[in-house]
Image (tube, grey):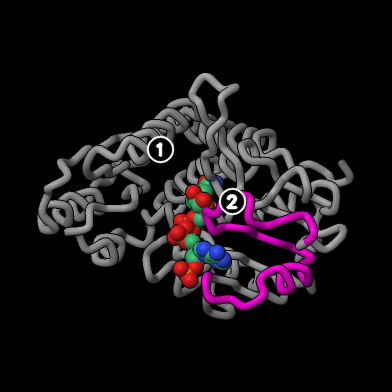
Amino acid sequence: MTAQLIDGKLIAQQVRDEVAATVAKRVAAGKSKPTLATVLVGDRPDSAAYVRSKGKACEELGMGSVSHHLPADISQEELEKLIKSLNDDKTVNGILVQLPLPSHLNEERVLQLISIEKDVDGFSPINIGRLAQKGREPLFVPCTPYGCIYLLEKSGVKIEGANAVVLGRSNIVGMPAALLLIGKNATVTVCHSRTKDLPAVVRQADILIAAIGKTEMVRGDWIKPGAAVIDVGINSVPDATKKSGQRLVGDVNFNEAKEVAGFITPVPGGVGPMTIAMLMKNTLRAAEIQDK
Ligand code: NDP
C-alpha cells in the first residue's frame, strides 16, 4: 500500500472529544446542555438506526436529545406543526428531520420551515444559499461534506489550487461538497450520471470525492498518482465469511486505489463516523449561537 490511510474513526473521535470537553465546560459554567431534537417519520429500519445512533452520540458527549417518532401516514400539516413547536422550544438547540421522508410529504417545505439557527443538518435553502454565495457564511455546513473537508484538512491535503472532482450532485453530499471545495479555492468539476468519459475526468483529480452509491465503480487506473481519495459511498455486498452475510464497501475499489493514491479513506471507518461527529459539532455551535 502506498497511500496514507485517512483514519476517519480516529479523527471523528478527536472531534467528539473536543465537543464533549466544550460541553462539559459550558454546563459547569451554568449554561444549557446543547440539545438535539430528532424527527423520524415512519419505520424505515435504516433511518431508525441513524436516529438511534445520533441520540446515543448526544448522550455520550453529555448533550441532550429528544426524539419524535411519527407514524408514516402523518399529514404535512401535523409534521409542520411539530417543526414550528420545536422552533419555538427554547430547550431545543438543533432540529434534525431524518431523510428521506415518505413520498406524500413535501420535504422542501419541511426543511424550509426549520429555523436557520437550529438547522444543524445545514439543509435549509438559506444555509445552502449562503454556502453558494461568495463572501457569505452558512450558519451550518451539511455534516457529511463538512466531514469530507475536515478529513482532507486534518490530513494536510492542500485544497487551494487543487483540481477537485466530485462524483455525485445530490443535495446532501455531492453539491454541498463541491460548494465547500470552491469556497476553499479548489478548481472543481462535478460529475453525475450523464458525465461522459468519467475515468478521463477522474484522472485529472488531485482530490476526488466519490458519492454516487455504486459499488467500487472507481477503479485504480482512474486515480491520478498521489491524489487524495475521499470515498463517501456505502454499499453492501454479499460476504459469506461474515455473520451478517454481507459487508460494506465504498464507491472506490479500495485495494486498487490504495496502490496509486496519496491519501485514501477506507469504507467503513472513513467518512461514515465523521457525519455524526460533525452533527454533534453543529449542535454545540447551535447552542453557542443561541446563547447570544
Ligand atoms: P444520491 O443517490 O442522492 O446521488 C447519487 C449521485 O450520483 C447523483 O448525482 C447521480 O447522478 C450520481 N450517479 C449515479 N450513478 C452514477 C454513475 N454511474 N456515474 C456518475 N454519477 C452517478 O446519493 P447520495 O448523495 O445520497 O449518496 C451517495 C453515496 O454516499 C451513497 O452510497 C450513500 O449511501 C453514501 N452516503 C454516505 C454518508 C456517510 O455518512 N458516509 C452520508 C450520505 C450518503 P444524477 O444526479 O445524474 O442522478
Say which label, 1 or 2, has the lower sequence index.
1
Q: Is mark 2 within 8 Å of ligand 1?
A: yes
Q: Quadrant of the N terminus?
A: top right
Identify the residue shown where x is 52% and y is 39%.
236
Q: In this rendering, would 103 be left or right of 292?
A: left
Q: Amino acid at mark 2?
A: Val
Magenta range is 193-221
**Label 2 element class:** loop
Find disc 2 in the rendering and name its residue.
Answer: 232
- Residue 208 location, quadrant: bottom right
Front of the two marks 1 and 2: 2
Label 2 crowd bin: few (<14), some (14–19), many (20+), radius 10 Å: many
Q: CA distance from mark 1 to mark 2?
A: 16 Å
User: Nearest the camera: 46 or 283?
Assistant: 46
Q: Is residue 255 above or below residue 131?
A: above
Identify the residue shown where x is 63% and y is 40%.
267
User: Nearest the camera: 107 or 165?
Assistant: 165
Q: Amino acid at mark 1?
A: Tyr
Tell me the chief SS of the magenta region: loop
- Residue 220 in the image, given as x and y percentages of width and height: 77, 54
Q: Is residue 18 above or below residue 199?
A: above
Q: Please say if the residues under marks 1 and 2 sit with CB atoms less than 8 Å apart.
A: no
Is residue 138 at all visible to an observer of this figure?
no
- Residue 128 in the image, given as x and y percentages of width and height: 45, 69
User: Which mark is on residue 50?
Assistant: 1
Q: In this rendering, would 249 be left or right of 219?
A: left
